[in-house]
Image (cartoon, coloured by chain):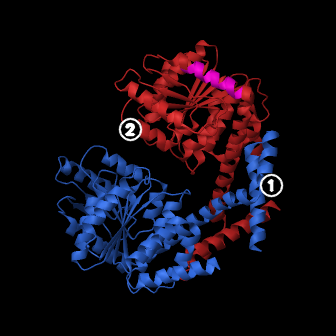
Chain colours: A blue, B red
Amino acid sequence: VSQILATNNVQELVDRLQSGDIRALAKLITLVEEEPRTARMVIDAIGNVSSEKQSHVVGIAGAPGIGKSTLIDKLAEEFRRRNRTVGILAVDPTSPFTGGAVLGDRSRMNRLSSDEGIYIRSMGTRGELGGLSRAARDAIKILKASQKDVILVETTGVGQNEVEIINAVHTVVVLMMPGLGDDVQLIESGMPEIGDVFVLNKSDMPGADYTMAEIKSIISLRSPNQKGWMPPVIKTVGLSGQGASELADAIDRHKAYLQKTGELLVRERKAYFSEVLNQVKLDLTRLVDDALKSDNTIIELLSRCFELKNNPYDTAEKILSGIIERKRDQIH
Amino acid sequence: VSQILATNNVQELVDRLQSGDIRALAKLITLVEEEPRTARMVIDAIGNVSSEKQSHVVGIAGAPGIGKSTLIDKLAEEFRRRNRTVGILAVDPTSPFTGGAVLGDRSRMNRLSSDEGIYIRSMGTRGELGGLSRAARDAIKILKASQKDVILVETTGVGQNEVEIINAVHTVVVLMMPGLGDDVQLIESGMPEIGDVFVLNKSDMPGADYTMAEIKSIISLRSPNQKGWMPPVIKTVGLSGQGASELADAIDRHKAYLQKTGELLVRERKAYFSEVLNQVKLDLTRLVDDALKSDNTIIELLSRCFELKNNPYDTAEKILSGIIERKRDQIH
């Protein structure tokens, strides 16, 4: 019964989402953050929503201190001037420990919240390994179902979760700033290969010309695997909003390019594959945790093998076989 | 045939390890770093080595900049003065990108290498998620088989891999230094609950008394889950070696406590459980990668489900069932 109630409840939230209810939107994202089981119910219900619009999803990657959130807020305002609705998803795996995301979010909310055409949300890590990218992907789907024209996903671009999230977007914007070490950071992250648009933020700082030349040389070196798209480099100053309009133009040009060449479908296919395989790995990991909770024989086997000083690899293989066997019986 | 040759080769290395050959020791650690399959062969062969000694494994956790490696070198020298042989394993998940570990290692080698009683080795991340803790645990087993009296494992103590590695040691030493934010860092890492010995390094710096009081208050707050062991706080100055002798004393006292109370066996049992379950998860993740490589039907299924816009959770479940079925057939 509680399952039926929950499903009804989720369906009601999705109905309210479609009629533009912001609280339903917030609640649905909380549901996908909380637990894989509720997330799955939400995504099931979302699947029935027919989108009239094709939301364009933009990943914006940059190291801490580059001024990501300030620039993204200006970019969001620029898109609003163009009459597009905007969703911002700020993904921060170090939250909730630092508290930075929560506070930052609140002040951003206050600054932007007078505009109902912008929805902003922070997401931090909770629980399972790889769970943040799963939740972020689901949140993107909810923002799509809420008919946002543009979805801006803010991430550092470094780390397993971030790379997974970047796999889920249409256009990748890579943020840089003048100064030592940025080139190294860029190269480490693998971003030169996947950036579609490059931004030199804080371009009024000393050393901007040098860093600009560095970025251009890095782009020129990359393998020409994209049919006919040459990544532009846009100069911005996040605080004043300078360059935000040029950045919006570049994102729109890239969107048109993706549609014209059929690359949009290629990317969505890749994103789907990556999402499903990530989910398979999460499901497998959960199998182990579930088996431990419900099956005393695993602990008994572990105790016996420990006393016999069995090789851990052999013990792991035995447990794996047991889990496979058990799961298979459940399937049949 | 190549399998038999490889096994013979590994067995020969283990024989040489037992006769004290340092190059065999280095080669065996390289083998466990490289690939799970060779690692398993090594651990199989190691399993037959009867240890006369019970190596004591000490995890030393501290943030970058605290002076971990300098202090650990002094501690190693102190143990050498007590006629114990020492293995040092410096685990750095950010290597090889920074290059720091490699360079640091070389200069440490030069400083310590005149003494054959100390073996020092750095390990960085390569390949699979969770693979570093697996390789580090295997390296500890090799150092045990080489009859080292003390094994010092150096880690930042933060992150998934580091926590896994800390699960594998007998005594946990937590390093701090005077200054702002260390208390926060300590609390975040969960170290107050698991530290057996606390060290205030750089204790000649301003603010040492304040940080000392902070550490003591944190220790006094923790749950009294350890029978009769009150974690001491040792003041050290890594550069001069001051306090290294007191730290060695504290580690020895903790070792005696573990043996006397039976807690040693409890910890080894916990470490074994944690190691095996980590390995089960690694094996499961590898199942997915192997299945993708050898089984075209998964890609076909993914393509079909993408075109039908199937819910990724449902598609993941289908693929999971396929992998379970396939693996089960291999087992039988």
- Residue at 50% over, 42% down: B189
Residue bearing the label numbered 1: A297
**Left or right, residue B145 beside residue B48:** left
When the figure is inspected, residue B119 is found, relative to residue A305, above or below; the finding is above
Secondary element under disc 1, as helix, strand or loop, is: helix
Q: Is residue A263 visible?
A: no
**Left or right, residue B90 beside residue A321:** left
Q: Are marks 1 and 2 on the same chain?
A: no
- Residue at 29% over, 62% down: A108
**Magenta-drawn stretch, dominant element (helix, strand or loop):** helix
The quarter of the rendered structure image containing the C terminus of chain A is: bottom right
Bin the neighbour count of mark 2 within 10 Å (Cα to Cα): few under 14, some 14-19, many 20 and up.
few
Q: Nearer the viewer, residue A138 or A216?
A: A138
The residue type indicated by label 2 comes to Gly
- The residue range painted magenta reads B247-259
Q: Nearer the viewer, residue A213 or B302?
A: B302
**Left or right, residue B4 beside residue A72:** right
A162 magenta-colored: no
Q: Are marks 1 and 2 in contact (CB under 8 Å)?
A: no
Subunit bearing disc 1? A
Residue bearing the label numbered 2: B181
B257 magenta-colored: yes
The quarter of the rendered structure image containing the N terminus of chain A is: bottom right
Subunit bearing disc 2? B
User: How far across and how far down the image is residue B316, in percent?
Assistant: 61, 71
As measured in the structure, the alpha-carbon distance from the residue carrying label 1 to the one carrying label 2 is: 45 Å
Q: Is residue A78 visible?
A: yes
The residue type indicated by label 1 comes to Thr
User: How far across and how far down the image is residue A219, in percent?
Assistant: 31, 57
User: How far across and how far down the image is residue B20, in percent?
Assistant: 69, 22
- Residue at 39% over, 85% down: A19
